[in-house]
Image (cartoon, rainbow, N blue to C red):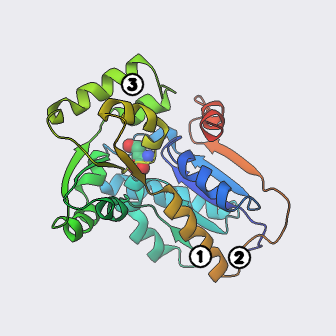
């Protein structure tokens, strides 16, 4: 494995581009291969076993392509498969993402925190353990959002359709004033502005992208795997569905 080998970034579609953005910001000299498994999307309404099997195949393929590290830029896949992937692929650092519950809980005492994520993420033990640690300090409400990633995959990040979807989604909570929102799915930062608008502009938004980028940098440095160059890295975007190329949308979201 060479220092110039790429860091692989995986998601079920274009969601992980929100993490890739943070990775490039922090490590502009690294080479990246982004892989969106859009043929098998969404992950969030599948079983943990199905997602785990898909991720095993994805990681195997990316290691064979020469990746020096794997970033699971998907909360659902991290919760369902990170442990098993780390047990199997011990030769390579595997970094996951987790919902930013900790920073949102320390943002304001006794506040109302809304955690948005996929149905599968919210079913996993991992997120419940995390929430249990902070439930004495803040009032946490979880909200599964099936259908939201699909709108992002269609490129509907602003406009009437997304506004109506969010209005309906938040309707049962219209009497609660949320102080912060945790975006527990990497697709949601792409619709951060619409979420802010739907909940009222004052709400504070947290996501795990920046923390994941920092952790990736830390692991690469620890292992002496950073790309020692002062030339801007290359970013390759690929996906599993040859009929639905994610590149145009991925580039738009990367530059947004
Ligand atoms: N972007 C993914 C996440 O962070 C999941 C979207 C999906 O495939 O349901 O959870």
On the image, numbered disc 1 is attached to which residue? 219
Q: Determine which quarter of the picture holds residue 36.
A: top right
Give the CA distance from mark 2 to mark 3. 41 Å
Return the mark for residue 61.
none
Residue contact at pointers 2 and 3, CB within 8 angstroms: no
> 167 or 177, which is in the foreground?
177
- Of helix, strand and loop, which one carries label 3? helix
SS label for mark 1: helix
In the foreground, 190 or 44: 190
Is residue 255 in view from this perspective?
Answer: yes
- Within the image, what quadrant is residue 244 found in? top right
The local secondary structure at tag 2 comes to loop
Q: Position of residue 53 (x, y in %)?
A: 41, 57
- Give the CA distance from mark 1 to mark 2: 8 Å
Quarter of the image where one finds residue 59: bottom right
CA distance for labels 1 and 3: 37 Å
């Amino acid at each position: 494995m060479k220092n110039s080998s790429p860091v692989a970034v995986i998601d079920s579609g274009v969601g992980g581009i929100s993490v890739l953005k943070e990775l490039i910001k922090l490590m502009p000299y690294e080479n990246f291969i982004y892989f969106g498994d859009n043929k098998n999307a969404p992950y969030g309404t599948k079983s943990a076993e199905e997602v785990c099997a898909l991720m095993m195949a994805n990681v195997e393929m990316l290691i064979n392509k020469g990746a020096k590290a794997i970033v699971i830029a998907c909360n659902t896949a991290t919760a369902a498969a990170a442990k098993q992937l780390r047990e199997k692929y011990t030769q390579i650092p595997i970094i996951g993402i987790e919902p930013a519950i900790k920073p949102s809980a320390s943002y304001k005492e006794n506040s109302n925190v809304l955690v948005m994520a996929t149905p599968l993420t919210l079913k996993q033990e991992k997120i419940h353990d995390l929430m249990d640690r902070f439930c004495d300090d803040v009032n946490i409400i979880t909200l599964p959002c099936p259908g939201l990633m699909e709108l992002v995959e269609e490129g509907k990040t602003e406009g009437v359709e997304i506004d109506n979807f969010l209005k309906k989604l938040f309707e049962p909570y219209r009497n609660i004033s949320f102080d912060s929102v945790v975006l527990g799915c990497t697709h949601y930062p792409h619709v951060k502005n619409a979420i802010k608008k739907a909940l009222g502009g004052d709400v504070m938004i947290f996501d795990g992208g920046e923390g994941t980028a920092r952790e990736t940098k830390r692991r690469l440095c620890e292992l002496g795997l950073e790309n020692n160059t002062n030339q801007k890295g290359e970013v390759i975007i690929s996906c599993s569905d040859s009929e639905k190329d994610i590149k145009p949308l991925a580039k738009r979201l990367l530059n947004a």
